Image: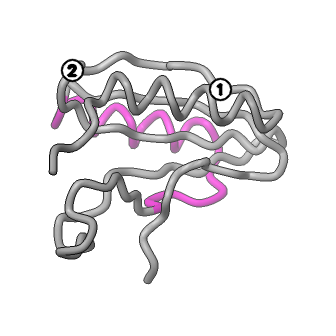
């Protein structure tokens, strides 16, 4: 089973967030086919959460092509978020960054269980 292209998945994420009453915007466009996707949740109170693609070990045989995320930053200020994203961009300049503004702190994506 093939994984959905990054550009199509991101468009769906933005639409889903907006349909649920959140504001979502593409902060950085990455590689259309398979760029890694990072999700910033702006809580609108100065705090931000950052989700990154989950490690490959988080996937199982039943759902090998699903997109799964892990929360790497929780409740940080914008300066720390921007520093972390700058490091990610040095490592992977083809990544996508989607920012969702939502007081309910919803990422609209599946998060890996601990």
* Vertical side of 107 occupied by 44: above or below: above
**Residue 110 position in % (x across, y down):** 49, 59
According to the picture, the residue beneath numbered tag 2 turns out to be 31
Answer with left or right where residue 95 lies relative to residue 28. left
Which residue occupies 46% across, 52% down? 51
Which residue occupies 36% across, 16% down? 29
The residues tagged by marks 2 and 1 sit, at their Cα atoms, a distance apart of 19 Å
* Vertical side of 96 occupied by 83: above or below: below
The part of the chain drawn in magenta is: 71-92
* Vertical side of 21 occupied by 63: above or below: below
Q: How many marks?
A: 2
According to the picture, the residue beneath numbered tag 1 turns out to be 24
Q: Residues within 10 Å of mark 1 (few under 14, many from 20)?
A: many
Front residue (pair 56, 27)? 56
For label 1, the SS is strand
Q: Would you identify the image quadrant in which residue 63 lies?
A: bottom left
Q: Is residue 53 magenta?
A: no
Which residue occupies 17% across, 65% down? 56
Q: Would you identify the image quadrant in which residue 28 lies?
A: top left
Front residue (pair 44, 84)? 44
Q: Is residue 83 magenta?
A: yes
Answer with left or right where residue 30 lies relative to residue 68. left
**Residue 50 position in % (x across, y down):** 51, 49
Answer with left or right where residue 18 lies relative to residue 97. right
Q: Residues within 10 Å of mark 2 (few under 14, many from 20)?
A: some
Which mark is drawn over residue 80? Answer: none
Most distant residue in the front direction = 1
**Residue 61 position in % (x across, y down):** 17, 74
The earlier-in-sequence mark between 2 and 1 is: 1
- Point out the image quarter for the C terminus: bottom left
């Amino acid at each position: 089973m093939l994984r959905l292209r990054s550009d199509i998945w991101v468009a769906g994420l933005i639409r889903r967030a907006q349909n649920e009453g959140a504001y979502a915007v593409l902060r950085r466009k990455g590689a259309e086919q398979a760029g890694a996707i990072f999700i910033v949740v702006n809580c609108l109170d100065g705090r931000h959460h950052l989700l990154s693609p989950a490690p490959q070990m988080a996937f199982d045989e039943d759902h090998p092509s699903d997109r799964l995320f892990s929360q790497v930053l929780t409740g940080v200020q914008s300066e720390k978020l921007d520093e972390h994203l700058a490091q990610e961009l040095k490592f992977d300049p083809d990544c996508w960054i989607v920012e969702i503004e939502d007081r309910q702190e919803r990422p609209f994506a599946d998060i890996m269980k601990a």
